[in-house]
Image (cartoon, rainbow, N blue to C red):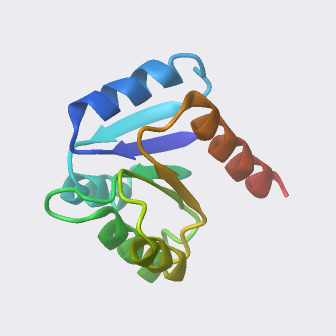
Amino acid sequence: MNILIADDEVRYRDMMRHLFEKWPEHRLTFAEDGGEAWALLDDPKRWFDVAFLDLNMPKLSGLDVVLRLRESPLHKSVDAVICTGSNDRETIKQAIALGVRHYIVKPWSEAQIADKLQQIAAKRAA
């Protein structure tokens, strides 16, 4: 799968980079903030299957990026995974209202990331 990882914290980007070394079948692209994430997602020369999005990022939040994905007919097939330290009900409700089906609270585990990828792959294969 082509995967975008957007997080303004370099340590989480590095952790994801290290984790995905175990799964070389996935191709990774990294963004340092929501604005860069949207620019990459909206680039007609690129395509992504999955976007792991931090919730609180500069320029655009993870939910702002998801809103743009859902508003664009070209991007509706991108599966968004919110990866955040925020676990409050209102934020989760907002994410669900935008069609987010995958929400992981930091600090995440390898098993959580693997589980989300398996769920997304199974849905895509169906």
Vertical position of residue 70 compared to residue 51: above or below: below
Which residue is nearer to you in this view: 115 or 74?
115
- Please name the residue shown 46% across and 74% down the image: 89
- Closer to the camera in the image, 88 or 14: 88
| Quadrant of res 117 | top right
Q: Residue furthest front?
A: 88
Looking at the image, residue 37 lies above or below residue 110: below
> Does 114 sit left or right of 88 as displayed?
right
Q: x and y percent of residue 120 in the render?
A: 68, 51
Residue 31 lies left or right of residue 86; in this view the side is: left
Residue drawn at (32%, 38%) of the image: 30
Whole-percent x, y for residue 54 in the image: 34, 52
> Among all residues in the image, which is located at the extreme right?
126
Whether residue 90 sits left or right of residue 35 in the image: it is right
Quarter occupied by the N terminus: top right
Q: Residue at x 64, y 46 (%)?
A: 116
Q: Can residue 48 be seen?
A: no
Residue 123 higher or lower than 16, as above or below: below
Asked whether the viewer can see residue 53, the reply is yes
Percent of width and height locating residue 95: 47, 73
- Residue at far left of view: 59
Residue 58, picture quadrant:
bottom left
16 and 125: which one is in front?
Answer: 16
Q: Position of residue 36 (x, y in %)?
A: 22, 52
As rendered, which of 89 and 94 lies closer to the eye? 89
- Residue at the (42%, 38%) spot, across then down: 107
Q: Is residue 80 left or right of residue 13?
A: right
